[in-house]
Amino acid sequence: MKSLDLFKLDGKVAVVTGGARGLGREHAFALAEAGAQVAICDLLVEDGERTREELAALGGKALFARVDVTSSSEVESFVSRVMETFGRIDILVNNAARPSEGIALDNVEDELWREIIDTNLSSLFYVGKRAALRMKEGGGGSIINIGSINSFVISNIVPRYNATYCVAKAGVHQLTRGMAAQWAPWNVRVNTLAPGYILTAQTAASASNPDIYERNVSLTPMGRYGRLDELKGAIVFMASDASSFMTGSAVTVDGGYTVW
Ligand SMILES: NC(=O)c1ccc[n+]([C@@H]2O[C@H](COP(=O)([O-])OP(=O)(O)OC[C@H]3O[C@@H](n4cnc5c(N)ncnc54)[C@H](O)[C@@H]3O)[C@@H](O)[C@H]2O)c1
């Protein structure tokens, strides 16, 4: 097959969690522009409906459902609905996550700790397990778990190191390896995409603080935050046959943040 044809996703069905806005929305567009039909879920109904309409305007079928990815029953119904609508699942981007609100570790209440670990780590298992079973029935698939540079390093936003978020994101990388080992015999590949600082609603609050913004920029060799569209190439590569022998890997797209 010619090299650019390897990236095509025509006939594939993709699911993106947290796809209503921000990077999840970009992932959904990247996959739809490469030919996939896309189902997104999120807590944000208005944004989700708008993104669904914009995806459908590209020409394919698109689905949005209001789903809390920490709820096993809501995840189960969503995956069933995707199967009823599209008949298969080939690609999953486990993207939904929440920030840890910049609270110093000693002040993090136990309940907040549980909520962040549940949203940013365990939900990837809740959705991933159910999607992988459908991929197995369909002959294989590709799961992309969204990690972070904070899987490798604690965020350096003194004095709030966002440790809870970083711990969850580190777990995402090991979950990826566990899923990859378990599901390789099903031809289900599982990889992590680890972005650096990209301007979204999640990073807007910290980026509006000039000290934090300058610090993050100066710690990034490329000297800037990433743009929303700068993960699209990696997503299509990881979702498609262009990465057909890659599983259990982490792809870092961070402007060089983790080289130092
Ligand atoms: N922006 C960055 O700089 C950056 C860097 C590294 C990693 N990431 C990761 O990229 C992903 C997207 O981040 P973003 O910056 O676009 O953030 P965002 O807050 O704009 O988007 C996250 C989406 O997930 C949804 N969500 C949160 N909890 C949910 C739940 N329980 N059920 C369903 N949906 C839920 C939110 O409503 C939101 O639409 C996250 O996994 C984030 O950790 C972002």
Image (cartoon, helix red, strand yellow):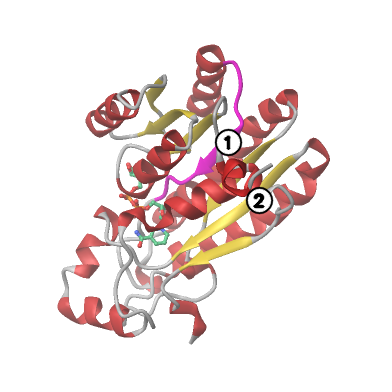
Q: Are marks 1 and 2 in contact (CB under 8 Å)?
A: no
For disc 1, the neighbor class at 10 Å (few under 14, some 14 to 19, many from 20) is: many
Q: Position of residue 62 (x, y in %)?
A: 40, 23
User: Which quarter of the rendering shows the N terminus?
Assistant: top right
Q: Position of residue 6 (x, y in %)?
A: 62, 43
Type of amino acid at the residue the image marks with label 2: Ser
Residue 68 in sight from this viewpoint: yes
Magenta span contains residue 143: no
Task: Kindly identify which numbered label has been placed on residue 91.
Answer: 1
Q: Is residue 112 above or below residue 90?
A: below
Near-viewer residue (118 or 234)? 234
Which residue corresponds to mark 2? 243
Near-viewer residue (235 or 150)? 235
Look at the image and give the residue range highlighted in magenta: 87-97
Type of amino acid at the residue the image marks with label 1: Ile
* Mark 1 or 2: the one toward you: 2
Q: Is mark 2 within 8 Å of ligand 1?
A: no
Q: Is residue 250 above or below residue 70?
A: below
Residue 18 in sight from this viewpoint: no
Secondary structure state at the residue bearing disc 2 = helix
Near-viewer residue (189 or 95)? 189
Secondary structure state at the residue bearing disc 1 = strand
Q: Residue at x 48, y 87 (%)?
A: 260
Q: Position of residue 177 (x, y in %)?
A: 70, 56
Query: Does residue 217 appear to the left or right of 15 in the view shown?
Result: left
Q: Position of residue 223 (x, y in %)?
A: 31, 80
Magenta span contains residue 93: yes
Quadrant hosting residue 28: top left
Query: Does residue 210 appear to the left or right of 112 in the view shown?
Result: left
Q: Quick one: label 1 or label 2, which is nearer the N terminus?
A: 1
Task: Kindly identify which numbered label has been placed on residue 14.
Answer: none
